[in-house]
Amino acid sequence: MSADRRPPAGDPRRRATSSRPVGASRRGGAGGRGARGTSAGARSGGSDLSARVIVAIPAALLAIGFVDLGGTGWALFMAVFGVLGLTELYRMLDRWRPVPWVGYVVLVGMCAAARFGGLVDVIGVAMLALPLLLVAVATRPAVKDATVAIAGTLLGVFWLGMAFAHAVLLRQLPHGGGVVIDVLVGTFFGDIGAYFGGRAFGHRRLAPEISPNKTVEGLIIGMIVAIVAVFVAHLYQSTWMTQTEALGLGLAIALLGPVGDLFESLVKRDAGAKDAGRVFGAHGGVLDRLDAVAFTVIAGYYLWALVPH
């Protein structure tokens, strides 16, 4: 209401207007929250946690089932999730004009090479992305921004393709299925420890420009939880895994898991995306759930490959 139309002193409308506290909204409380808003937010947080648990349990059982299956079934499972992750990534990087079909073909080929060949074959298939990208980019109607298109496509190939192919390679090592489970357990429990540890004790931000909600305290708690989780899992595998090997694996997961998490956060922030996708419902997309695993599973492979069998 402009100044020349303000109700005169003594007008009931003016008294009604001025009775509302400064900064309070029409829906109650400053900024529209108040007691009702706070309780609603708490209920929302609780329901979100419940939704995450509901999604996490069947997803974990499905993953364990395919890990136990191993062989071609596990390789196909990895290829499918790899393609889903690439789809999310290339959608976020759409302005870079990547070439999705090259990423899909190469990632599936890398998983097949891991299943029926070895690490050298995986690297060989990955290198095929370069000539394929040359053909794909050069035959576009307008050869524009070719460098960033190639870079965006290769990001998916070497970030996700290498991760899922190494998961296949790790499963084929002696007792590899058990180590895959250890990697998943350490990574996810470390993530949970960092989340709740940060909420309870977090004060110092870890990387505010990349992921504002992560804290140094949460990082430390998450690392400790990851190491303990792997060590506890090893107690059921003590016939073929030593305490030193379990601690080494746990330490690698504790160090690289947060790196993978921050790596995906950096990509999402640059792309202006909050979540990579909604494959896992409240858990977000494939990249949101497997960002840390994309780093820890590779570390798990090389560490376990060095162990005499």
Image (cartoon, helix red, strand yellow):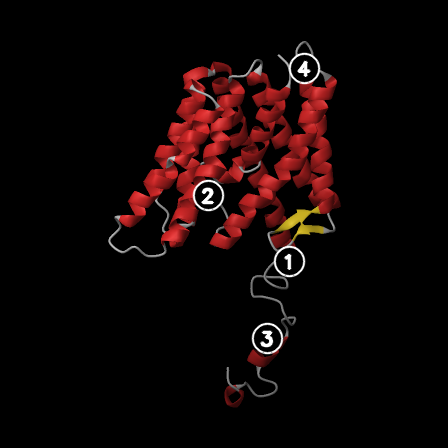
Residue sitting farthest toward the top? 239
The residue nearer to you, when weighing 18 against 181, is 181
Q: Which residue is mark 1?
A: 34
Disc marking residue 241? 4
The residue under the point 63% across, 40% down is 258
Q: Which residue is mark 2?
A: 155
Q: Are marks 3 and 2 in contact (CB under 8 Å)?
A: no
The residue under the point 43% across, 42% down is 154
Q: Secondary structure at mark 1?
A: helix
The percent coordinates of residue 297 (x first, y second) are: 56, 29
Is residue 277 at all visible to an observer of this figure? no
Count residues near mark 2 (Cα–Cα under 10 Å), then give few for <14, some for 14-19, many for 20+: some
Q: Mark 3 or 4, which is nearer the eye?
A: 4
The residue under the point 65% across, 40% down is 195
Q: Which residue is mark 3?
A: 16
Q: Amino acid at mark 3?
A: Ala
Q: Secondary structure at mark 2?
A: helix
